[in-house]
Each structure stands twice: as structure tokens, then as C-alpha cells.
Image (cartoon, rainbow, N blue to C red):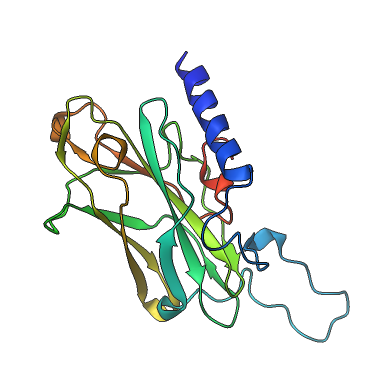
């Protein structure tokens, strides 16, 4: 039964992301991200050496964090999509899981546990290297189970941190626009709640790929 509910929720999520709804960034542009293993190979006999697989890592100043498409809550889970956009003039790469921190209305850190993938929404597949053309976006999905015992503190802001070029880090801050029982709230049960963890997807080239049926 749990597998059927999970598959149903993930299928609906996939249809929401693929059915014409697009983010305010990324999908609205002609430039599209791709996996590094989808890059075209150099022609045989080319005198120009091929670039390293995937190319250089994105610089911190080239990236911007913005909201992605709204994700409707279902099966007890709630999720929020975020887009990482390349504002630079050259292609670059992102890979792996971002470090996520959620804050309440006072700016205090909410003491969530974080999991790499899993749940009804978030993919459990391994990270891939995403190649971002200028103005293209990659995506991260953040999800948690509802607060059955009520909300203790609302999550109002999020920080996503990723390794960037030259040993630096990108840290993007964005509002959590959804509060209360349908947001990423900290539950009254706290760490004693049976499901207090936040599931985080790896950086993916499309919003649909962040989902559990990708």
C-alpha cells in the first residue's frame, strides 16, 4: 500500500512539472541545462582538445537562487522547488546535494535532520553533473512530512549552499513562501516526531528529474 501511495504521489508530481507549468526562470529560456554525459563528443580528428567532462564548476557570483514551480501538497508530504540560475556568460557545471538550512521568523536555525533524497516526492537517484548554459537553470526539491501534532515554528527562509569554482562556496538565500501546515514548518513533536527529517534532492537539470519517479 505504501508503494502504491508513493508511486501515485510521485506520478502526480511528475505530471505537474511536465504538464506546461514552468518556473519563472530556466524553462522560460531557450538555453537549457543538460547532464554532462549528454554533451556532444568532439569530431574525430579534431585538432582542438576536448574540455574536461562537464566543464568548469560554476562560480559563486554567476549563480542566483530563485523559487521554482509551485508543488501541490499530497499524501501527507509538502515540497518546495528552487532554481539555481547561471547568470554568467559561459557554461559551467553543478553537481551533488546542496547543504540546506531553514530559519524561523526570528532568523533562528530550525534543528531539522536532513536526508539525501527519499520520501514520496524526492528522487533517490545518485547526483549527476549538470551543465548550465548562460541563463539556464538547475533545480533542487526540498520536502518534508506534514505536522500531525501541529506547527511549533514556521520556516520562513532557506539557505542552499553548494561548492563553487576555485574552492569557494555559493550560498543562496530565499524565502519559504508557504507557511503553516502546508509549508516546511517545524512540528510540535520536534525531534520526537516520527518523521521530522527534510528530504533534499541533488541538483538536477529539470524540475521533473528531482521527483521520485525520475
Residue at the far bottom: name it: 47
Above or below residue 147? Residue 110 is below
Q: Choose between 42 and 118: the one closer to the eye.
A: 118
Quarter placement of the C terminus: top right
Query: In percent of the image, x 30 and y 52: which residue is there?
Result: 176
Choose between 73 and 45: the one closer to the eye: 73
Indicate whether 33 appears above or below 60.
above
Q: With respect to residue 160, does 146 lie above or below?
A: above
Taking 38 as reference, is 133 left or right?
left
Pinpoint residue 185: horizontal percent, then vertical percent. 23, 41
Residue at x 38% of width, y 57% of height: 98
Is 139 positioned to the left or the right of 107 in the image? right
Using the image as rendered, state which of residue 104 and residue 213 is in the foreground: 104
* Quarter occupied by residue 173: bottom left
Residue at 50% over, 61% down: 95
Q: Residue furthest top?
A: 1
Residue pictured at 63% horizontal, 42% vertical: 19
Amino acid at each position: 500500500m505504501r508503494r502504491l501511495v508513493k508511486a501515485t504521489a510521485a506520478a502526480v508530481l511528475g505530471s505537474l512539472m511536465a504538464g506546461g507549468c514552468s518556473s519563472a526562470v530556466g524553462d522560460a529560456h531557450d538555453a537549457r541545462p543538460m547532464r554532462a554525459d549528454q554533451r556532444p563528443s568532439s569530431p574525430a580528428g579534431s585538432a582542438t582538445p576536448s574540455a574536461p567532462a562537464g566543464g568548469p564548476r560554476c562560480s559563486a557570483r554567476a549563480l542566483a537562487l530563485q523559487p521554482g514551480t509551485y508543488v501541490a501538497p499530497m499524501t501527507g508530504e509538502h515540497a518546495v522547488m528552487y532554481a539555481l540560475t547561471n547568470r554568467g556568460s559561459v557554461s559551467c557545471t553543478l553537481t551533488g546535494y546542496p547543504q540546506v538550512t531553514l530559519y524561523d521568523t526570528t532568523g533562528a536555525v530550525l534543528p531539522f535532520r536532513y536526508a539525501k533524497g527519499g520520501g514520496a516526492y524526492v528522487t533517490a537517484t545518485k547526483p549527476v553533473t549538470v551543465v548550465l548554459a548562460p541563463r539556464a537553470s538547475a533545480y533542487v526539491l526540498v520536502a518534508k512530512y506534514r505536522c500531525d501534532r501541529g506547527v511549533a515554528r514556521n520556516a520562513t527562509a532557506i539557505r542552499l549552499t553548494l561548492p563553487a569554482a576555485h574552492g569557494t562556496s555559493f550560498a543562496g538565500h530565499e524565502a519559504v513562501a508557504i507557511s503553516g501546515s502546508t509549508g516546511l514548518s517545524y512540528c510540535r513533536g520536534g525531534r520526537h516526531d516520527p518523521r521530522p527529517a527534510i528530504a533534499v534532492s541533488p541538483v538536477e537539470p529539470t524540475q521533473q528529474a528531482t521527483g521520485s519517479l525520475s
